[in-house]
Amino acid sequence: MADSPLFEKACNELERVTHLSPAEARGTLRIALREAGYDAGSVNRPQLLAVVFHSLPQELVARGLQDAQKICDRIASHLATA
């Protein structure tokens, strides 16, 4: 199954605002989605935003990124225009 356009948009923004490679950004977001019980192929905007605010910050901190909440706020803002 192909990934949802929203997942792709979130991954692209995560790459843009961090030093993560494309594979690292996708993997990090996939882990956060999986922990919340969602799938990258079918995630919708409310689900993805919930993950960005609640699960993703922990994943970013685990990868040594500073300002995880600020990064997540930027991703959420980017998704709001999707």
Image (tube, rainbow, N blue to C red):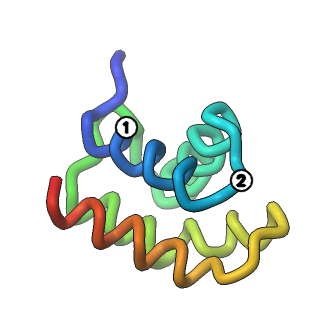
Whole-percent x and y of residue 35?
Answer: 57, 57
Residue 26 is left or right of residue 44, and the answer is right
Q: Which residue is mark 1?
A: 8
Residue 75: x and y, percent? 40, 65
Tell me the residue at 27%/44% (across/down): 6
Left or right of residue 62, residue 19 in this image: left
Q: Earlier in the sequence, mark 2 or mark 1?
A: 1
For label 2, the residue is: 19
| CA neighbours of label 2 inside 10 A, class few (<14), some (14 to 19), many (20+) | few
Numbered circles on residues, count: 2
Q: Nearer the viewer, residue 36 or 8?
A: 8
At horizontal 55% and vertical 69% (from top left) the residue drawn is 55
- Mark 1 element type: helix
- Picture quadrant of residue 47: bottom left
Q: Secondary structure at mark 2?
A: loop
User: Quick one: which residue is furthest to the left in this view?
Assistant: 81
Amino acid type, residue under disc 2 in the picture: His
- Coordinates of residue 66 in the picture (x, y in percent): 74, 78
Label 2, label 1: how far apart the Cα atoms are:
17 Å
User: 52 or 67: which is nearer to us?
Assistant: 67
The answer to whether residue 38 is left or right of residue 29 is left
- 11 versus 74 height, above or below: above
**Quadrant placement of the N terminus:** top left
Residue 31: x %, y % from top left: 62, 48
Q: Looking at the image, is 82 positioned above or below residue 2?
A: below
The residue drawn where x is 49% and y is 77% is 54
| Type of the residue with mark 1 | Glu
Q: What mark, if any, has residue 78 been given in the picture?
A: none
Residue lying at 56% horizontally and 83% vertically, measured from the top left: 69
Mark 2 or 1: in front is 2
Q: Is residue 29 above or below residue 71?
A: above
